[in-house]
Image (cartoon, rainbow, N blue to C red):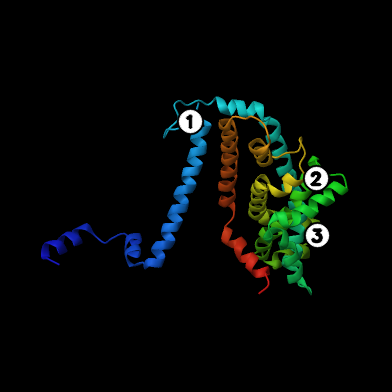
Amino acid sequence: MSATGTTAARAAGPAPGFLRRALRAGPYAWIVWGGVAFFLVNLAALILSVVVNSFAVNWFDSWLPSAFTANWYAEAWREFNLADVLLVTLIVALVVVALSLLLGVPAAYALARRDFAGKRAVLLLLMLPVLLPPITYGIPLATLMYKIGLAGSLAGVIAVNLVPAMPFVVLVMTPFIEQIDANIESAARMCGAGTRQVFTRVLVPLLIPGILAAAVLVLVRTVAMFELTFLVAGPDSQTLIVALYSAAFTPGIRAAQAIDAMAVIYTLLSAVLLVIALSFVNPTQIVAQVKEVSPE
């Protein structure tokens, strides 16, 4: 390299770390990152096309719609009864969160504090609804709901969503409980606190971050749960994601822009809940817990 080139390179300063790593990367790394970039570009284009179409008066053989309007959102709100659908979604999600916390937190405490024969087997059985695709146990579960008369009702939708939600709370809460020193509980008992006082005045305040994380994650999961809800929901017990599917695939003449407007509403709701969830919990913590209870 000439003296002029060397001087120019030094003046430009060191290359950014990402650029240096990219230049040293082999062909395999370039293929992987190229595949990731291709996927992200296509995903962004798909989402952008849905958003643009939800504001389009009409959109045919052109790069952009001929005109834009927000009337499709009002039409979707009226045509698909989104006020009632959102109310049902809110009721189902909040009840599932409350019941899963009520059942899951004590179960997580017992599993975190007690050692007994078959503990790993119990943990694995609890984790199966989280690890398995919902459709694998959704059809037998829906059959049971129809037999006992809960299918098509709000109670049935809540019941089937509890099946994966409660183990999910156990999965999230167990590491939080294990991080709390058991000597704190012993000290509270030595001072005369009973079991209920230890739980409500000592443990619960310490577990608030974990409880909030579990609650938000269950909320996100319940709003996004399609398979189980679809199998048992009735006309008056559909959540937003099931209503969106019905609007798109039920026979009838519906404006594609109104359906896309409904999809945008669902996407925004899910994105907001996901951002809130990630602010409370680290996903790697959940993955580590799954690996710990999974058989080798």
Rendered image quadrant of residue 79: top right
Going from N to C along the chain, the mark reached first, 2 or 1, is 1
Residue 124: % across, % down: 72, 67
Q: What residue type is labelled 1?
A: Trp
Question: Do the residues bearing badges 1 and 3 touch, measured as CB atoms within 8 Å?
Answer: no
- The answer to whether residue 276 is seen in the rendering is yes
In this image, 289 relative to 141: left or right?
Answer: left
- Disc 2 or disc 1, which is closer to the eye? 1
Instruction: Find the distance from the CA under tag 2 to the CA under tag 1.
Output: 41 Å
Q: Which mark is residue 195?
A: 3
Residue 100: % across, % down: 74, 52
Q: Residue at x 69, y 60 (%)?
A: 132
Q: Quadrant of the N terminus?
A: bottom left
Which residue is the extreme one toward the left? Answer: 3
Would you name the residue on which mark 2 appears?
Answer: 156
Which of these two is toward me, 110 or 234? 234
Would you name the residue on which mark 1 appears?
Answer: 59
Going from N to C along the chain, the mark reached first, 3 or 2, is 2
Which of these two is toward me, 211 or 278? 278
Which of these two is toward me, 124 or 109? 124
